[in-house]
Amino acid sequence: MEKLRQTLRIRKERAILVAALLSARSDSDDLAELTALAESAGAVIVDRFQQKIRKINPATYLGKGKAHQLAQRVRRFKADVVVFDNDLSPNQIRELEELINIKVLDRSELILDIFATRAKTKQAKLQVELAQLEYTYPRLTRMWSHLDSVAGAGGGTAAGTVGGIGTRGPGEQQLEIDRRLVGKRITELKRELTNIDKRRIREIKGRSGLFKICLVGYTNAGKSTLLNTLTDAGVFVEDRLFATLDTRTRKWTPARGAEVLISDTIGFVKNLPHQLVASFRATLEEAVNADLLVHIIDVSNPDALNQIESVDSVLAEIGCGQNPTLKVLNKVDIVKKVGQLEMLQTLFVDAVAISAKTGLGLDRLSEVVTAKYRGDEVLLRVSSSQSNGKVQSFLRAHGQILNEQYLDSSVLIDAKLGRNQLAGLKRLHPDNLEVIQS
């Protein structure tokens, strides 16, 4: 058992994928996503094993009979690892590993492993390590075979058995040593991340005068490609899950006078381990504090609707489920399923269809974002000193001047301006500002 759990990595290992579905469930997972996850982790898929079960077996999840069938397939395909599309208890992992005699991973362990290989910056590495340890901590019991009692000094002698002077008591369990070490490291990581997070949150809140857009979506939906196309950000892009974990923020000018900040975030996935959501919460503050969420949807994926639901679930979990959101239907150039795009456009009538790769539809995206940036148009009458040229410059850049009347040392301006730009105009301290029609 100990040898089986020395590493949770599955680099170049021969993997069998397993999905156990409760009979009551109407959907039929085809293991496509778990396949993509396992391949992203570096595994070579040699077999897929999908079973419907009436109830979860507390010992082996699948049930003893099906677990024995799995053991036979392990031997037939000479597999190195079995990966479940379910979250297993420590006891279930232990029982399965004893039965099939190779390493068993569940879905959460697999995702945590992928995140560990993708983390490049110090913050991302700390966040992933914290998530891994928080996942491991409650599972220390019976996960490794070395968790036996360690007797006190002289434990092998008669005196030690009854407890000599200074050695009485059962001794310390290796389990308690492991727990203490893991707990100490978790505390250290949280302290270090808190300091980083405070700086990051201060940075985000320091952008209060700017309109903030955050790209969210399922992993591999095309967020980084879109950010690169709009801003020349140079963000790493590859056709694989969780290609980037670090948020990138760039300036974007969708129209004259409309300068915004646009940020990319980590991709979401179905049943994203809550430990990851918790440890990456500061990274996801970009989404929480955004004025507009742009939800990128991969319309070429047959499972797009379930992916949308998964993203919405994570957004609700981090506290921004009610934020203004624009849905963007990406990859329209490679849709193969007949009627897929039309179905999504019918469900989400305000969505914008684009191809981040080819640039198709990006002009329309810029128009919609600009309209949301400016807000409903209002008619203003502004009085300002002629020496305060910033007021006139702001109105020309962000709105439309309808009339100017110069009176002695002041100027009276009638203009149209987006409601969202009123705060920026007020910061320039005009002598008087009146909304005469909204």
Image (cartoon, rainbow, N blue to C red):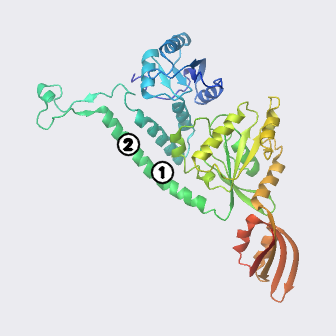
- Label 2 amino acid? Gly
> What whole-number distance in Å separates the C-alpha atoms at marks 1 and 2?
15 Å
The image shows residue 3, relative to residue 382, as above or below, that is above
- Label 1 amino acid? Leu
Residue hosting label 2 = 183
* Residue 391, quarter of the rendered image: bottom right
Most extreme residue toward the right is 403
* Residue 271, quarter of the rendered image: top right
Rendering coords of residue 390 (x, y %): 76, 75
Rendering coords of residue 165 (x, y %): 11, 36
Residue hosting label 1 = 193
Rendering coords of residue 250 (x, y %): 68, 54
Q: Residue at x 70, y 45 (%)?
A: 295
Q: Are marks 1 and 2 in contact (CB under 8 Å)?
A: no
The image shows residue 191, relative to residue 274, as above or below, that is below
Query: Left or right: where does residue 423 sit relative to residue 98?
Result: right
